[in-house]
Image: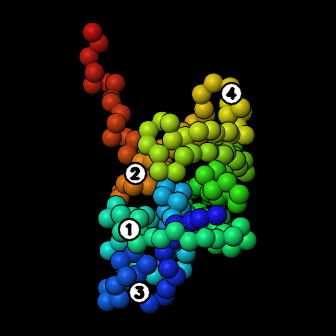
């Protein structure tokens, strides 16, 4: 199988190749997100300049550099599994996502229920790497009670798609409960019409 990858190094930045700027380690989450969005293999534990990372993601400029610096390499299935095993169980906040070993465009996400303690929802999303729009998601399934519907999808699927499509790119991700009172109206001060 042919895979786009960047070299492995502890001394120079895997994104720009520079040596002088302050560095940080590429986390499993960063590596898994680059694989999920662009199908580029970035080894976890690589070093990258701190300016290439904002929050828990690579900047758009860093992703563009990765696209240019990555080169196609032939990997047999055993080598690919060994590389992917480094970030198969990446954790990003409340989502624990896993990349399928044989189908890299299939992810499984485990998330805790907000209503039942001890309940974990497992869901699967299949997507087209590099795709845009609603046609990028080619399939989904959630094991929750409403996830087995034949039409539409449950809120768990929507929240994961929203997070991977939009939420992880926001620098200051606000959770609804943090500012819910700001959106409430006091009914005592409203006049009846």
First of labels 1, 4 by sequence position:
1
First of labels 3, 1 by sequence position:
3
Q: Is residue 109 above or below residue 154?
A: below
First of labels 4, 2 by sequence position:
4
User: Distance from label 3 to label 2 (Cα)?
Assistant: 34 Å
**Badge 4 is on which residue?**
149
Q: Nearer the viewer, mark 3 or mark 2?
A: 3
Residue visible at 45% across and 70% down in the picture: 70
Q: Are marks 3 and 1 in contact (CB under 8 Å)?
A: no
User: Distance from label 4 to label 3 (Cα)?
Assistant: 49 Å
Check the picture and name the quadrant holding the N terminus.
Answer: bottom right
Q: Position of residue 108 (x, y in %)?
A: 66, 51
User: Distance from label 1 to label 2 (Cα)?
Assistant: 33 Å
Residue visible at 52% across and 51% down in the picture: 129
Q: Secondary structure at mark 4?
A: loop
Q: Is residue 125 above or below residue 16?
A: above
Q: Are marks 1 and 2 in contact (CB under 8 Å)?
A: no
Q: Is residue 137 visible?
A: yes
Mark 4 closeness class: few <14, some 14–19, many ≥20 residues within 10 Å = few
**Badge 1 is on which residue?**
68
Q: Nearer the viewer, residue 117 or 30?
A: 30
**Badge 3 is on which residue?**
12
Q: Is residue 140 above or below residue 84?
A: above
Mark 1 closeness class: few <14, some 14–19, many ≥20 residues within 10 Å = few
Q: Nearer the viewer, residue 168 or 134?
A: 134
Q: Nearer the viewer, mark 3 or mark 1?
A: 1
Find residue 54 and report its image quarter.
bottom left
Q: Nearer the viewer, residue 103 or 174?
A: 103
Q: Position of residue 163 (x, y in %)?
A: 48, 49
**Badge 2 is on which residue?**
174
């Amino acid at each position: 199988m042919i895979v786009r990858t960047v070299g492995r190094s502890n001394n120079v930045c895997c994104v720009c190749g520079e040596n002088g700027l302050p560095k940080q380690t590429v986390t499993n989450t960063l590596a898994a997100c680059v694989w999920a969005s662009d199908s580029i293999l970035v080894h976890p534990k690589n070093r990258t300049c701190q300016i290439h990372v904002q929050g828990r993601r690579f900047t758009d400029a860093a992703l563009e550099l990765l696209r240019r610096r990555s080169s196609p390499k032939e990997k047999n299935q055993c080598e690919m599994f060994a590389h992917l095993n480094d970030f198969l169980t990446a954790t990003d906040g409340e989502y624990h996502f896993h990349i399928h070993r044989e189908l890299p465009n299939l992810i499984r996400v485990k998330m805790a229920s907000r209503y039942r303690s001890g309940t974990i929802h497992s869901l699967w999303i299949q997507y087209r790497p590099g795709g845009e729009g609603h046609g990028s998601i080619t399939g989904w399934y959630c094991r929750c009670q409403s996830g087995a519907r034949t039409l539409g999808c449950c809120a768990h699927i929507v929240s994961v798609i929203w997070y991977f499509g939009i939420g992880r790119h926001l620098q200051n991700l606000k959770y609804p409960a943090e500012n819910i009172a700001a959106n409430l109206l006091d009914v005592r001060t409203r006049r009846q019409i």
